[in-house]
Amino acid sequence: MRIKAYAERLLEGLERIDWSDSIKEQQRNWIGKSQGASVTFAIENSTESIEVFTTRPDTIFGVSFMVLAPEHPLVNQLVSPACKEAVENYQREAGLKSERDRQADVKNITGQALGAYAIHPFTGERIPIWIGDYVLASYGTGAVMAVPCGDQRDYDFAKYFDLEIKNIFADVDISEQAYTEKDARISHSDFLDGLDAKTAMKKAIEAIEAKGIGKGKTNFRLRDAVFSRQRYWGEPFPVSYTNEIPSLISDELLPIELPEVDKYLPTEDGEPPLARANKKAWNHFQGDRMEYNTMPGWAGSSWYFLRYMDPKNEQEFVSKEKVDYWQNVDLYIGGSEHATGHLLYSRFWTKFLYDQGYIPFDEPFAKLINQGMILGKSAIAYLDSEGKMHSFDLIANDVTNFREVRILIDLIQDDESINLEELRKWQPQFEDMQFITNEHGKITVKREVDKMSKRWYNVVTPDDLCDKYGADTLRMYEMFLGPLEQSKPWDTKGITGVHGFLKKYWRLFHQNEQFVVSEGEASKEAMKYLHKTIKRLRDDLDRFSFNTGVSSFMICVNELTDQKCNNREVLTQLTILMAPYAPHITEEIWSKLHSDNTSVFDQTYPVFEEQYLKESDFEYPVSFNGKMRFKVSLSVELSAKEIENHILGLPETQKYLEGKTPKKIVIVPGRIVNFVS
RNA sequence: GCGGAUGUGGUGAAAUUGGUAGACACGCCAGACUUAGGAUCUGGUGCCGAGAGGUAUGCGGGUUCGAGUCCCUCCAUCCGCACCA
């Protein structure tokens, strides 16, 4: 999949979508755009040449050697007879290491001279060519022009192998390390002398292009992706082979379904699992054999949302009409772990389909919210070298000589100690374990927050809570925990608060276990709180602030309880308002409010009306030098001058002014009063 | 190393455009009703202080009548990428 061809547009599109900075930045990093130039270096006594990519063409006069990746295709041709053996040894060693290992082992500088020389395009100087595994075959051209004065890795390499380090920066000391800033003037560089980096870069590229040895170029870190997997679970390709020549299965036979196999494992001779299927196992078999590879996970995830618009369409993945109507996804809620996988591929596919004219948009998800993960609290116990378990509180300041072992969190009691009886039964290794207990005879554990995972024994399931408190309580508690985007450890300590709230809501409708609501007009106060709540919830919902939404309901129910309000109209509106948050209890209440078999979910959602909130007075906080001292309730009708006069006349004001005349009086009607002295 | 995010009570957190810091809960304290409470209700609860008051949003500075919020420096924690030329 040539995702690289879309690199520039995948970057540009980020400007137009409402995603978090962190995800956008992750995608930018992953795409890894760098601008510079490609330069071709001729090779002494050879018709071959080496192309390099550099982001610092301005430093071309600082080149004192070149480094190729050990796998570079020219290495074998260029190596001198004298260096041949050493080079081959080096290549073999580098080949043994995986790319990951090579990248992990950064500090270890290795390399080998080829005994060949390139020619500097401007100075004509001989430049020794080396190989080194700090140069990656898969990035750029797999070769670099080394400028030790301006690049720390080149500098380290040069120091280690005692290669020349030219200083081409004016007034910069490079005796200890390379100078990687771009703010020095260029020197010892012929036509670039005296220029700043930016100008020099432009001029260097012009010179390189004029000489016909290269051009300005943009490089991307992003790599093209293989679109096949040697796994069972994945969409099968509609492809068959005759004499190993592939051909497409015709449309009317689609879809090709996964065939049954005896095992989901590769065959003995290394073919993918689908090779296990016999002819009859395929719903349509053609040619000598079917394609054995399946598609990767992101094949379907990249565009499934389009299919949702038109799931029964047998002719197209989505009809023009439907996709024109629905357009792209307005809001996508998903985990940030998909930042450089699904979320990038999906953008790529969408752009491709847009280019092909199938869909009218080129970004799949207009707004993205990353919900935080609910984390688990692992319990860690400590074993000494003899296998005895020590209470954590005894050894907390030094655990270096202990081995950590994770304990099933169900065995941890409220005081952070292990239920030892249960522990012995849990796993055989603990059956005869000896314990070094604390003064209470207990073994405490250390708690650590991790992703929930079976291997950490820190998984909690919501089932018990659901049994105990009901689904509504659990649902609202999850919302109440904190901001949607924030990760947090699962902690059920506060769940009784939400449960109590729902009971309090229930009690608004009941007296002595009888359902009682009053008819007639609601009080002004009750309507005010109802509409305050409607407004708050509307704003909270706009911000996806579910935690404050739940608290808005609590405030409202507390207030209505205090007012002893059981007015039918007010409680009906509140119930509709709360239905999305606590669907079960509100539907139950609804059925008590209405005997006509309607559902609370079919009702019109309450709309905020300003008129109920009109206040005649505002309680002004009166501050002196920014410190709030007292409050005074005044009509909202008053002008700033009238407020000032009234407040100046108050005895408290005179007390805090201590007889002085204030330098300045700041009055913001409807907000604050501040005296500056 | 580069980039992103987050730092507020004992705890989870709130404060939407700079305008009463700590809403709403948990926990804790005191009380009521109870044989009992993991039920319900009332009051209190940032810290220091008997009080008046002082002080407080990671540290330090700045802008402002006024800063959790804006600007600068630093620190800590978490996450992503990392020999990318």
Image (cartoon, coloured by chain):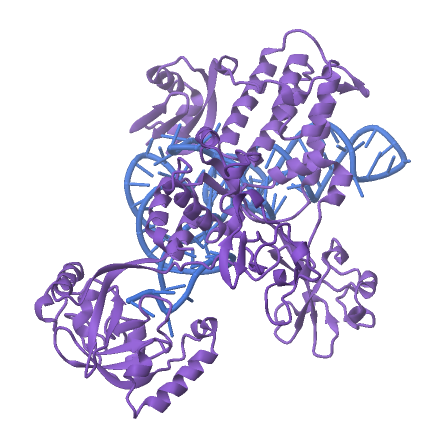
Chain colours: A purple, B blue
Q: In which quarter of the image is residue A221?
A: bottom left
Q: Residue reaching furthest left?
A: A191
**Closer to the camera, A361 or A404?**
A361
In x, y percent, where is residue A133? 38, 77
Asked whether residue A397 is in view, the answer is yes
**Closer to the camera, A63 or B28?**
A63
Q: Quadrant of residue A597?
A: top right
Asked whether residue A180 is in view, the answer is no
In x, y percent, where is residue A12? 33, 46
- In the displayed structure, A47 sits above or below A604; it is below
In x, y percent, where is residue A119? 17, 78
Q: Residue reaching furthest bottom?
A: A82
**Closer to the camera, A285 or B17?**
A285
- In the displayed structure, A389 sits above or below A355; it is below
Image position of A74 (left or right of A375): left
In x, y percent, where is residue A319? 48, 33
Image position of A215 (left or right of B74): left
**Closer to the camera, A132 or A138?**
A138
